[in-house]
């Protein structure tokens, strides 16, 4: 819980808002009973859930999220997608990196594909093809 409290304090969240969000997020991710555990005692998925809760606690204008679905089960993944869609609907910009392209296709407005650190492709998500057609000549 101290780790989560530190995030709330660093964003100067008022106590009621903090407690309500922690309650909602820990129930959503089914991790209420793990908040007082040491991180080393948690599975990768549980640690990912704690990190996700910390990221979603404050109201910020921009969320930077790297591989948020790694280690999450299908239920937590769906819950995270819904929460990110809610944040986006409220005006939060989200910059997300992921190898799980099928998951983020419905979340994103635009996409950028990088190859060896260089922009290979950048477009509106409507033009995105998960498996581009390969042409042979």
Image (cartoon, helix red, strand yellow):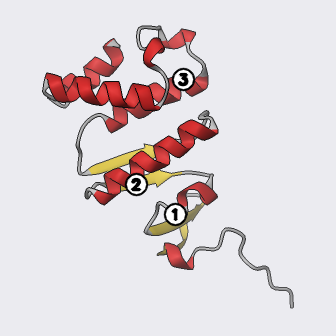
Q: Which residue is most to the bottom? A: 137
Cβ–Cβ below 8 Å for labels 1 and 3? Answer: no
Please tell me which residue lies in front, 72 or 119.
72
N-terminal of the pair, mark 1 or mark 2, is 2
Residue 25 rendering spot, x and y as whole percentages: 38, 31
Q: Secondary structure at mark 3?
A: helix
* Marks 3 and 2, how far apart at CA: 22 Å
Q: Which residue is mark 2?
A: 85
What residue is pinned by disc 3? 46
Q: Is residue 8 above or below residue 91?
A: above
| Real-space CA distance between mark 1 and mark 3, rounded to the nearest whole angstrom | 25 Å
- Do the residues under discs 1 and 2 have CB atoms within 8 angstroms? no
Contact check, label 3 and label 2, Cβ < 8 Å: no
Mark 1 neighbour density, 10 Å: few (under 14) some (14–19) many (20 or more): few
Category of crowding for the residue at label 2, using alpha-carbon neighbours closer than 10 angstroms: few (below 14), some (14–19), many (at least 20): some
Identify the residue shown where x is 35% and y is 13%: 1
Secondary structure of the residue carrying tag 1 is loop
Residue drawn 35% across and 30% down? 24
Q: Nearer the viewer, mark 3 or mark 2?
A: 2
Residue 106, position in %: x, y?
Answer: 52, 63
Q: Quadrant of residue 44?
A: top right
């Amino acid at each position: 819980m101290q780790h989560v409290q530190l995030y709330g304090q660093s964003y100067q969240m008022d106590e009621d808002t903090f407690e309500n969000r922690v309650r909602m997020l820990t129930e959503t991710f089914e991790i209420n009973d793990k908040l007082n555990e040491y991180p080393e005692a948690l599975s990768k998925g549980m640690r990912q859930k704690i990190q996700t809760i910390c990221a979603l606690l404050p109201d910020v204008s921009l969320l930077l999220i790297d591989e948020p679905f790694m280690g999450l089960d299908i239920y937590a993944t769906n819950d995270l997608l819904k929460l990110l869609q809610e944040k986006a609907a409220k005006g939060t910009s989200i910059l997300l990196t992921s190898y799980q392209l099928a998951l983020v296709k419905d979340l994103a407005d635009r996409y950028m594909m990088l190859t060896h650190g260089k922009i290979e492709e950048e477009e509106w998500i409507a033009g995105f093809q998960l498996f581009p057609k390969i042409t042979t000549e």
